Every structure is written in structure tokens, then in C-alpha cells.
Image (cartoon, rainbow, N blue to C red):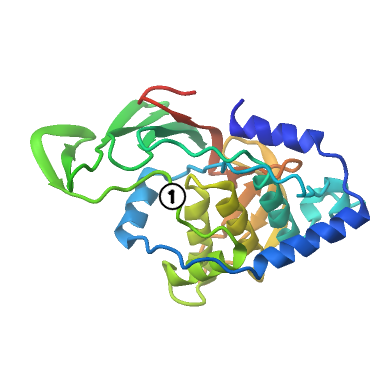
Amino acid sequence: MDDMRLLQQIGQETPPATPEQLASARGRLLAAMTATSPAPTTIRRSNRRNWRLVLSGMVAVGVAAAVTSVVVLAPDQLGGDAPVARADASQVLRNAAAVSLRMPDLTPRSDQLIYQRTQNRQSIRESWMSVDGTRDGLVRETSAGGTTETVIPGCRNGRMAAVKGGQVVPGRTEQCAPEPAYRSDLPTDAAAMRTYLAEHRSGEAGDVNAAGKDVLFLAESYLRPQTRAALYEAAAAVPGLRAVEHVTDGAGRPGIGIAWPSTNGAEQMVLVFHPETYAYLGTSRYTAVITHTVVDEVGQTG
């Protein structure tokens, strides 16, 4: 069973929470937001840019330890008789955080690859990325115009194969630093995650549009569930978020849209979550997560 199906099963099997459970859950969530964590490890800005080019439109559904005390808020408890899409945006993100914590904590081996299949409007993108950044990977894009493949060289001993036109150039190498597809050193509580986002922001202080893209960048990474939950909790504290009705992801799947504040005329970013399981689906009209798993070789899909 892949992560998306597991999330759906969790949502279907979780009974509606009682008022007492809801109050207790909110208390735990608030406590998590004020917790402390070791200082996060610095990530190179060049890595961030490279991964955005390689992983555009990709998202990871984290794998983490099951937490039996977490209460998943049922849709009809978010806003009375109102549709779930009209719920408070911050609460939707907190629900997504709670569901993330219900996932099993499975750590991929360093010699494995992260496989992701996403849909970007009318094209399909598949990628096989090295867990520790040392193995060769591949990105395959399929559209009406055909299929293209781009080799992603692994970085070993500070050198990697040179690539031209998506293919390795025989006998040529260049300097590099490994860019792992899996990060286990990121914050695992909301307070530390807010600090991390502030210290590693891509824009100026107060640029909410840039901050939203930073959240999206991490959401498109393979994260431990504790880290994914911390990311959603940190995002929930951003002022100006709103829930949007009648949104679809890049595959046309309906969901709850969380609209990020935009400035300077920038296009508004809308993150889409499943209306019942709160799994991250993609971005409104642009991207959709189809499959996400860990494999041993390039070409494997599960």
C-alpha cells in the first residue's frame, strides 16, 4: 500500500472526535507550536535552486511514527453545517499535521532512491532521486510530444559526471556536493520550523509570497512525518491564509485549497489538500501527486 492510499484509509477509519478530544487535541497542537528543538542545519542556497529545477511539481507524503493520541478532526466538525472548504485555513493545516503524525516512520537506506510520479497539467513526470545524493538518478517526462529523459549524476568524492542534453558526457566530470533526496536533519516541531524558515528564507523579510514558496519547496521534499507536521503547523501560523472552495489539483482532483497571501501582483499560490484525509494533493490546476515511494533501482515504480 502506498502512502496516499494509507492516508485515505486512515481518514476513513478514524471516527468523529468528541468535543473533549477536540479540546485535548488543540492543547497538544498549541504545545507543539511553542516547543523547542536543536538549531537546524544550514542548507546551501545553490542546492535549493537545483532541487527546484529537478523536483518542480513534486511532493512527498512523509513517513513517520504512528501517534495513537492524535485526534483527526472530522470534516463536519470544522465548520458546523458549512462545507469543509469553508473551514478555517489554519485548522485545515493543523488537521494535515495531525494526519502526518499517523504515518509509520520508515527511513530509506542511503543506497535507495526516492521515486515520485506527478502530473503537471497534460504531462507526466517521473523521477528517481538518490537518497544520499551519491547514486545516479533519472527524470523522465512524458507528454503528447513524446518522452524525454535527463540523467541526474550522483556526486561521489566531490566529483560527478558532466551532463549535456540530458545525457552523461563520457570521460568528463565536474565538482559537486551531494544533494540528498531525503533530509532527516530538519526541525520536528513548529517553533523550530518557523525559525528555520526565517533563517533560510529565499526572499526579503516580510515577503509573504517568497515565504509561501519556501513552504512549498519543503512540502515537495521527502520528509519525516514529524517534520512534515511541523511544516504544516508553522504554515498554519501565517496570517492571511484562507480556505478556497471548488479547487482542483493538476490531475483535476477536487480538494480544499489553502490560498497563500500574494504581494506585488504575484500570482496567488494555492496548496490543495484532500477534503477528507487532509493529504497534500498538489497545487491548484498545476501539479498533482500520483505516486510516491522508495525503490532500489532506477526504473522501479514500487
Q: Left or right: where does residue 211 sit relative to residue 64? A: left
Up-down: is 139 above or below 210? Answer: above
Q: Within 10 Å of the Cα at label 1, are there few (<14), some (14-19), or many (20+) other Cα atoms?
A: some
Determine which quarter of the picture holds residue 297. top left
Q: Left or right: where does residue 187 sit relative to residue 130? A: right
Q: Callout 1, which amino acid?
A: Arg
Up-down: is 189 above or below 167? Answer: below
Q: Left or right: where does residue 106 sit relative to residue 144? A: right
Q: Nearer the viewer, residue 166 or 94?
A: 94
Up-down: is 9 above or below 64? Answer: above
Q: Quadrant of the N terminus?
A: top right
Q: What residue is pinned by disc 1?
A: 183
Residue shown at 43% from the left, 45% from the top: 182
Name the spot of residue 159 as percent of width and height, x first.
Answer: 16, 45
Query: For the image shown, how many numbered marks are present on the structure?
Result: 1
Q: Secondary structure at mark 1?
A: loop
Q: Residue reaching furthest left?
A: 171
Residue shown at 54% from the left, 64% from the top: 193
Name the spot of residue 93 as percent of width and height, x first.
Answer: 68, 55
Q: Left or right: where does residue 98 sit relative to residue 289? A: right
Q: Nearer the viewer, residue 87 or 122?
A: 87
Determine which quarter of the picture holds residue 165. top left
Residue shown at 32% from the left, 61% from the top: 44
Name the spot of residue 111 as percent of width and height, x first.
Answer: 35, 33
Q: Residue reaching furthest bottom?
A: 205
Name the spot of residue 151 as percent of width and height, x first.
Answer: 27, 33
Determine which quarter of the picture holds residue 4. top right
